[in-house]
Image (cartoon, grey):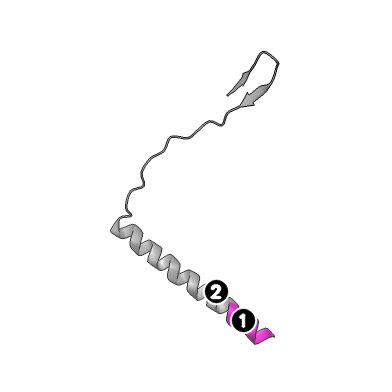
Amino acid sequence: MYTTDDRGVLNNYAIEPVAYCAEYPSQEQQQRYLFQGAAAILFVSLLVLTAFGVS
């Protein structure tokens, strides 16, 4: 969306998205997040240990 004044100056306006409130995650989603976090910690730990082992 934009407007132009009588001198030809152009003003651009951003289109604002509709805001909404987030919903609290269900018990199943919380368990999935816990599993993903544990897998991420394991993966990063293996990367760090591999880096120490190689060096």
CA–CA distance between discs 1 and 2? 10 Å
**Quadrant in which the C terminus appears:** bottom right
Image location of residue 36, percent across then percent down: 44, 65
Q: Is residue 18 above or below residue 43?
A: above
Q: Residue furthest front?
A: 7
Kind of residue sitting beneath label 1: Thr
Question: Which residue corresponds to the image point at 53% horizontal and 73% vertical from the top-left?
Answer: 43
* Amino acid bearing label 2: Val
- Report the side of 3 relative to 31 (left or right): right
- Secondary structure, mark 1, is helix
Q: Counting other residues with Cα less than 10 Å from the Cα at mark 2, is it few (<14), some (14-19), or many (20 or more)?
A: few
Which labelled disc corresponds to residue 50? 1
Q: Nearer the viewer, residue 21 or 2?
A: 2
Is 51 above or below relative to 40? below
> What range of the chain is rendered magenta?
48-55
Given residues 46 and 3, the one toward you in this image is 3
Residue 14 found in image quarter: top right
Image position of 8 (left or right of 50): right
